[in-house]
Amino acid sequence: MAKKKIKLNVVLLKNNLNIGAPETFIENYKQDEEIIFNRGNINAILYKKLGVYRELKWVKNLKNKIVGNFDSDFPSNQSSGVTLFIEVQNRIFAINFGTLGRFNINKNVIEKTFGIYTANKLLNNDLTATIKSAHSRVNETNPINKQRQYGSDISNNQLFLSMEDNEALKELAVISYASEDFSRMIGKYSSLNVQFLFKNTEIPCFQYLQQKLSRLLDIYNSVSTDDIKKLFKGIYPLNSIEAETLNEQLPNKLITSTDTFFLFEPEIDYDLSLVATIKIGDEFYDELSLSSYLMKNPQPSFENLIEDKIFFLNEDDDIIKEWSILECLYGEIEENNTNYILSAGEWFEVSKDKYDRISQAIDEIIDTDFVIPNHIKENIKAEIRQAVSQKPNKKINKENIFNTHLSNHIHGYLFDEAAKQINLYDDRFEVCDVLHQNSFFHVKYNYGASALSHLFNQGYVSAKSYAEFTSKYAEAVNVHIPDVANHLSPQPDNVTVHYIILNEKSQDRLTFFSKMALEDKIRTLQAMRFKVNLTWVRDIY
């Protein structure tokens, strides 16, 4: 008999929570927001969240910035959501519905590893299961990521080969053909999207849902370290119980090991150019600075790190992004000969050999001999100031100004122009920002992880094209080099890919995930016989 498929978004809450104390896991709990329904003999809460009627932002902009005020009524919007909290084996599951359902949950009590670990374990247990798609935090060229585009399944017996490059896995979609409870699940951090299977006689399914959730919990509880290491290649997230000791030590680590921690932007899905200022507490800053926070709160508790907020504001003082200090805190520590990474509020364990290999690879390419003289820096800053004064409301391309001065200083060729991008077999890309003899300089201001990923990939794509299509590549580049004596050779020899990071922050730091992305490019470029350098340049802007 065919079964009914019901797709639900499931979240597991941390241990030791009592469903009789909803204020401990429901954000801003109000008893009158509970919905009365037939619970039977199941411990459960149905909780609603209604948004407020408000004028749409585009309507406000239309009135204030485009046509002026008017009397006609425009639509207002109201978002809403409901969350079903249900007790299973003394744990609490939350199932969200609607736009605002997820905001009912206090995000500090979410078991972050539940989704990704459970999907992983189902894949390991069920030899008939297949990977429909996966997404890695680091490697954009991960072969499994391409399956999202092509839609083909990867069988379990191809698992290890297929997932070999999938470091820092953050999403895994699995199809099960043997389970009688689920046909598909997408494991993520914080949640698990599950396609449950119910008999027609089990609809409505509430009274039967607890049994299915119990089986999910059994799968999650059975996860072992070996299970995790099959899909997390040398770096895997710790669950809340494993992270407890590290969290207890964290406040003291911030004070005694300040050089191993810094603040960074944990998300990249926003337009950085819209950020006018950063607010921490009641103070305003130009950059995220851990030292500035510790000056205001020299001995923060772990609760302070959760409760104290960081706001990114635009010119109208509207909030673009909001995070806790903990979510913005990055650090690396070593305990009992094991390396741990704190990133976006989560702890990751890193195998010793991977940590040492990647750290060494980055250290070996840092070039401190390449220096921009102070008088060149002063000229760059003067030109930027002049551009800002002449066009105060226009975004200034500071990188281009730096690249122009760099090119003149080293007597190179400026390629930071759209007209100097080249085409090879209908593939258009940037050669570099500045070319000097056999050194390809790729420059990026240190905005964050996404900008750095673009920087590393830009250098890789250009060099790879040179190695694969040497004559065509050299011919296309030489069109923009008037001096024949400086033309590229059709045979790459002694070529350097030189990354330059313009950094006005207080520390020259890369997160370990950025290091992993760069190290992947270093290994490939060096295998193609390219030299790779990295230089930090500060005091430019």
Image (spheres, grey):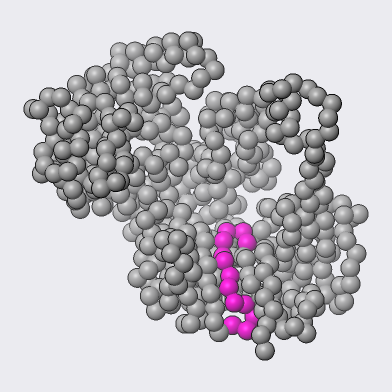
Tell me where the magenta segment starts and ends, as one range: 179-191
Asked if residue 380 lies left or right of residue 63, the reply is: left
Q: Measuring 49% from the left and 14% from the top, which residue is drawn there?
A: 391
Q: Quadrant of residue 316?
A: top right
Percent position of residue 525, x then y? 24, 48
Q: Is residue 226 above or below residue 362?
A: below
Q: Position of residue 405 (x, y in %)?
A: 29, 19
Return the residue nearer the eye: 3 or 50.
Answer: 3
Above/below status of 440 relative to 215: above
Q: Is residue 27 visible?
A: no
- Quadrant of the drawing holding the C terminus: top left
68 falls in the magenta region? no
From this view, report whether residue 176 is shown above or below residue 72: below
> Is residue 190 a member of the stretch shown in magenta?
yes
Front residue of 427/119: it is: 427
Residue placed at 54% from the left, 25% from the top? 286
User: Relative to the observer, which residue lies in front, 515 or 381?
Assistant: 381
Number of labelled discs?
0
Q: Is residue 4 visible?
A: yes
Q: Relative to 539, does residue 107 appear above or below in the rendering?
A: below
